[in-house]
Image (cartoon, grey):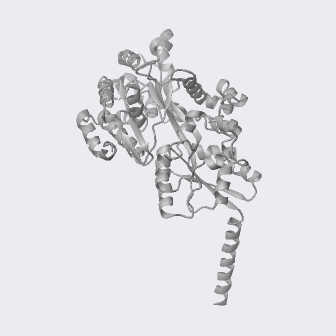
Amino acid sequence: MRKFLVFLITLVLSFALVSCKKDDGIVVRFAITSGQIKTAIESLQFEERFEEMNPGINVVIVAIEGSYDDLRANTMMDINSGSATAPDLVIGYPDHFAEYEGGGALVNLQPYIDHPEYGFTEEELNDFLESYLAENRGYNSERPDDLYGLPFNKSSEVLIYNRTAFELLFEDEWEEKVPQTWDELERVSLEIIDLVKAGKLDEHWVKETDGKEEGFLKVSDYVQTGKFAPFGYDSSGNAFITLTRQWGGKYTSRDSVAKGYAEFFEDGVAKQMMEDIKALHDAGIFNLAPNFGSNYCSDALKAIQCIMTVGSTAGVRYNESSDYEYDLGVAPIPYKHEDKKYVIQQGTNICMLDVNSTEEELLAAWKFLKFMLSSDNTAAFAIETGGYFPVRKSAFESERYQNYLTNPAEEKKAYSAAARVAQEYYISEYTYFVDPAFIGSSKIRTEVGSLFDDIIVNGEDIDARFEELRNDLYAFVIKK
């Protein structure tokens, strides 16, 4: 019994020592997704460098397996339960922040931004790209210009294509065949289908199984089995939202963060867009990943089942194949009308949460947020991840980032090309957009993505599917 008591006391003291060590400083929990973002933060040593500059503040990176939606769901559970380990900082989209606001946890960053000692000067705040700041406003109708988040890892969509296939199919004219509009994409795709059927790509890529060559990949066989289309769109949700705007329609609107509307039922443009895209699919031109039997259109491009896809700049390198050697090309996404060259603004922002936090803890979280968004750090993060962009103008213009754009390392060439295209968006007539966030806007996005899938993949009737969706989203259709 005596030995057991000695053991028990020793165990309690051990826990006490560990507890004291953990309580030795203020803890800032930063919730992110695992994978590319976590790897970059670790590589750049954000926590260690910040802690050296700020003794007494300990940063804990909480990496959630899964998607941004999984991170949102996990964060909402922490908010609703009042968890002591709820994150102080979390990355996410504006519609996620709307839910955190609805849960009473979203912190208004404006007092920290305006703080004379710890905040940003007017010059520093103006250094952020305005379109990135704009999506973090509007959470409080009484203070509509206050910022409730700041941009972190931003990206967009680009047209990614198999440049080698274009050269094989069109020879010296290949550059002229890269489509700029949806009408051009339709015309060149019909040419591609005819050339592929004729075997123009059949004598180039060698198939291998277990290291043994099995002759040439016959891309024409994909056409015969219905597994080839010249073009694929990777994100059904992005496709519906972007193309509705490009066709001249509206997607959503809001009165406040608590009340928003699905506008796309009203003018018939979204339905016409779906009819046009369905016609492209029926002509063998336009596919989604499941049409190819894949999880992502990048998988189809790697298998030479398609030679063009619209995807995220953050995922360009996923289109590089280990089985077949080819060069990638990157171009702006196709547009429908010259005056409606919309392209979606993607990537997450950082917000601060107050779940039973002290003012001291919130200030510590703000300091870490500000540290990560310094000009040098956002440039370094963009280069390290490859497909994300800096969030400050000075970072874009820095010698280091410009060198990355013009002289990238071999493994970053595709990402660098995508970043150059995204930079073109800013200086050309393209319009970056983000739809207003409100409680329920993430549900609408999920539902329109499902509608797009059901029509293009499952062949469901357009009118019936729109009517079904109107009923499902009834609360967002009726304006009060």
Residue 364 rendering spot, x and y as whole percentages: 68, 55
Up-down relation of residue 430 to residue 379 (above or below): above
Residue 300 rendering spot, x and y as whole percentages: 43, 31
Q: 374 or 400: nearer the eye? A: 374
Query: At 71% across and 38% down in the image, what residue appears?
Result: 376
In the image, 224: left or right of 361? left
Query: At 31% across and 25% down in the image, what residue appears?
Result: 276
Up-down relation of residue 25 to residue 263 (above or below): below
Quarter of the image where one finds residue 214? top left
In the image, 404: left or right of 437? right
Is any part of residue 295 visible from this angle? yes
In the image, 410: left or right of 117? left
- Quadrant of the frame with the C terminus: top left
Is any part of residue 322 visible from this angle? no
> Furthest-front residue in view?
142
Residue 424 rendering spot, x and y as whole percentages: 57, 23
Residue 397 rendering spot, x and y as whole percentages: 68, 28
Q: 321 or 444: nearer the eye? A: 444
- Quadrant of the frame with the N terminus: bottom right
Quarter of the image where one finds residue 336? top left
> Furthest-bottom residue in view?
1
Q: 332 or 117: nearer the eye? A: 117
Q: 395 or 296: nearer the eye? A: 395
